[in-house]
Image (tube, rainbow, N blue to C red):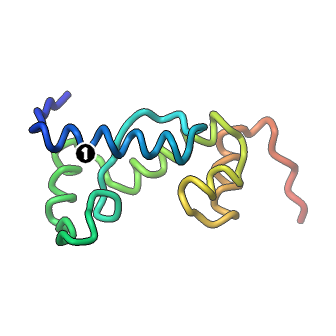
């Protein structure tokens, strides 16, 4: 585990973001905060660099897409509702259905050829 101490402003901003996420998506089950170039920034500030994001993931030996896929799958296990996944993550409905089928293979409809 890698422990990072945040300054007061960062702590307040992270807490505000988590409160906003809980307000917007009360059914979301993942308590973690993942900061991306799209989610961290204020419109008046410059975007976070790709190198900074990549460095953070390299330190833990994980690819960003793996973290996202794990997050989608975790939510799919909890809800089994592809519409919920589309609303929370903004993913295509076909992708949402695939995550629900992966999370609940016992409930998947048989494939029609």
Report which quarter residue 52 is drawn in. bottom left
At numbered mark 1, what does the secondary structure look like: helix, strand or loop?
A: helix
**In the figure, 102 relative to 91: above or below?**
above
Q: Which of these two is toward me, 82 or 55? A: 82
Residue at position x 53%, y 48% in the image: 24
Answer with left or right where residue 45 lies relative to residue 79.
left
Q: Quadrant of residue 73?
A: top right
Tell me the residue at 30%/51% (across/down): 35
Which one is nearer the viewer's eye here, 46 or 8? 8
At 33% from the left and 47% from the top, the residue drawn is 34
In which quadrant will I find the N terminus? top left
In the picture of the structure, the residue carrying the numbered disc 1 is 13
Percent from the top left, x then y, of residue 80? 71, 41
Res 26 quadrant in image: top right
The reply, left or right, for residue 94 in relation to residue 57 is right
The percent coordinates of residue 78 (x first, y second) are 63, 34
| The C terminus - image quarter | bottom right
């Amino acid at each position: 585990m890698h422990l990072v101490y945040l300054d007061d402003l960062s702590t307040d901003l992270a807490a505000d973001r988590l409160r906003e996420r809980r307000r917007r998506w009360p059914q979301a089950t993942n308590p973690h905060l993942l900061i991306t170039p799209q989610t961290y920034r204020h419109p008046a500030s410059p975007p976070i660099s790709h190198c900074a994001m990549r460095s953070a993931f390299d330190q833990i030996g994980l690819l960003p897409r793996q973290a996202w896929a794990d997050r989608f799958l975790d939510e799919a296990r909890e809800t089994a509702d592809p519409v919920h996944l589309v609303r929370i993550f903004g993913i295509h409905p076909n992708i949402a259905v695939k995550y629900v089928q992966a999370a609940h293979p016992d409930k998947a409809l048989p494939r029609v050829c």
